[in-house]
Image (tube, helix red, strand yellow):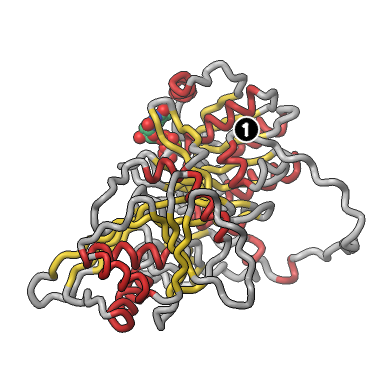
Amino acid sequence: MAKRPARQFACRACGAVYPKWMGQCEACGEWNTLEEIAVEPLAASSPRASSKGRRVKLEGLEGMAAPPPRIRTSIEELDRVLGGGLVPASVVLVGGDPGIGKSTLLLQAACKLASKGERVLYISGEEAVDQIRLRALRLGVGQATLDLAASINVADIVATLEAEPDVRVVVIDSIQTMWLETVESAPGSVSQVRACAFELIRLAKRKGFSLILVGHVTKEGALAGPRVLEHMVDAVMYFEGDRGHQFRILRAAKNRFGATDEIGVFAMTDRGLEEVSNPSALFLAERRGNIAGSAVFAGLEGTRPVLLEVQALLAPKSGDNAPRRAVVGWDSSRLSMLLAVLETRCGVKLSGMDVYLNVAGGLKVAEPAADLAVAAALISAATGMPTSSGEVYFGEVGLSGEVRQVSQADARLKEAAKLGFDKAVLPRRIARGSARTKPPEGLTLREIGHLSDLVTADMEAE
Ligand code: TYD
Ligand code: MG
């Protein structure tokens, strides 16, 4: 007798599966995101029903054929994050908030590819064909020989792709609008999103085209988020940025064919997304010199150095409340640590103050190398002394206040010199004759071993 399949519930935000419904997902902590999913037929069938397997062929590591060449989109910032271009028969998921510019980016990429003679299909479940044409016109890419379709029916899409010859790249915008008749739930549900993606991915692998899936990140949790698909695809990139800012950053979260620490920087203009090949200049464009509480961090995003402004603001805390620690673009526990180090090791008292910290431009910094720049901004805010406008900072700060080495100091220094900075504050070279090449022309180095060196110098200058 066939056993009644057990019920299963999956989280729309992260895809975790549970045998019973719960109010909060234990994996990601989101509330009210669990929904019932169809139990996969394989799990439901009894072991007796499974047919006997065939022997698979075993092979050695050697004897690989040359990998097929990558398909370059000619949008440098995108190609870099992809690891050098799209890989045939691979699947890339592009996630991001609604309205951040995913459709714009992919339409631009699709048009570029099409104008290079690649066969590209752009299938939208969100916009009518005329809307896409209008957008392409606005982007100034209207003449590209792109194949457009508006459809949400995956069976139709699969039938079309089966019949079309020489398809190289397919864009599906978005996976949450796609629908398979055989799955009994609404578009955007975990079951639909997974089943539709599975069908499309299988076809991409079989036919050898490169598949790009768009996935909206939804905070409200009405739709299944891209994380539900992360394990099914070859690469995951997130398109980020504040709606209030011009900058958009494409970041790889997973990449089977490349590094995940590269970023692509774009600016949203009235003619679509423009590549920003020199992000430092853009991030520093609005910086005003001579204001206390600001310091420039020479950071690294992937292989690329990026200069950023770190801003700190201190205000006396109100009443008996605990002081506020508000951070944008950096790690708040790292800030607490730095404040403790400044107070205990350097005698800079900030515990009676509300602290606001902001990485200008909307970039999120993950590097511990930013410690020194953050400390400089905090010290500058505390003393009211602006840091010199020609100065950059980098270095990790340890719990005893020591300033530690960080990777790729040379690349950071070079970028600083390129942008006209004349002084860098950085960790002291460790003795053992560690080789630092000569600093770039026009840049003087100030190597410090302890955070208190930064404090004393600033207090002395006062
Ligand atoms: P879109 O690509 O539709 O976002 P997504 O697909 O991620 O939901 O981008 C929509 C936003 O981008 C919209 O607010 C308008 C803006 N935009 C421009 O500023 N310039 C342009 O040329 C285009 C096409 C869009
Ligand atoms: Mg869109």
> In the shown orientation, is residue 203 left or right of residue 293?
right
Number of callouts: 1
Q: Residues within 10 Å of mark 1 (few under 14, many from 20)?
A: some
* Residue 73 in picture, x, y percent from top left: 63, 34
Query: Which quadrant does the C terminus fall into?
Result: bottom left
Query: What amino acid is found at the position of numbered circle 1 in the picture?
Result: Ser
Residue 93 placement, left or right of 390: right
Quadrant of ligand 2 in image: top left
Q: State the residue at coordinates (50%, 52%).
A: 226
Residue 429, given in percent of the width and then of the height, sits at 55, 71
Compared to residue 282, the image places residue 371 above or below, namely below
Quadrant location of residue 292? bottom left
Residue 255 or residue 388, whichever sits in front: 388
Q: Please name the residue shown 62% across and 59% down the image.
A: 437
The image quadrant that residue 26 belongs to is: bottom left
Q: Is residue 165 above or below residue 39?
A: above
Quadrant containing the N terminus in the rendered view: bottom right
Direction from residue 411 to residue 454 in the image, left or right: left
Q: Look at the image and tell me whether residue 353 can be seen.
A: yes
Name, please, the residue furthest toward the top.
Answer: 143
The location of residue 444, given as percent across then percent down, is: 47, 57
In this orientation, which residue lies closer to the viewer: 1 or 294? 294
Q: Nearer the viewer, residue 394 or 360?
A: 394
Quick check: 108 above or below 53? above
- Write the residue at 52% across / 18% down: 142
Tell me if I can see residue 193 in this picture: no
In the rendered image, the vertical position of residue 381 relative to residue 47, given as above or below: above
User: Which residue position holds label 1?
Assistant: 74
Q: Which residue sits at x=42%, y=25%?
A: 271
Q: Is residue 104 left or right of residue 52?
A: left
| Disc 1 element | loop
**For the residue with label 1, is its CB less than 8 Å from the closest atom of ligand 1?**
no
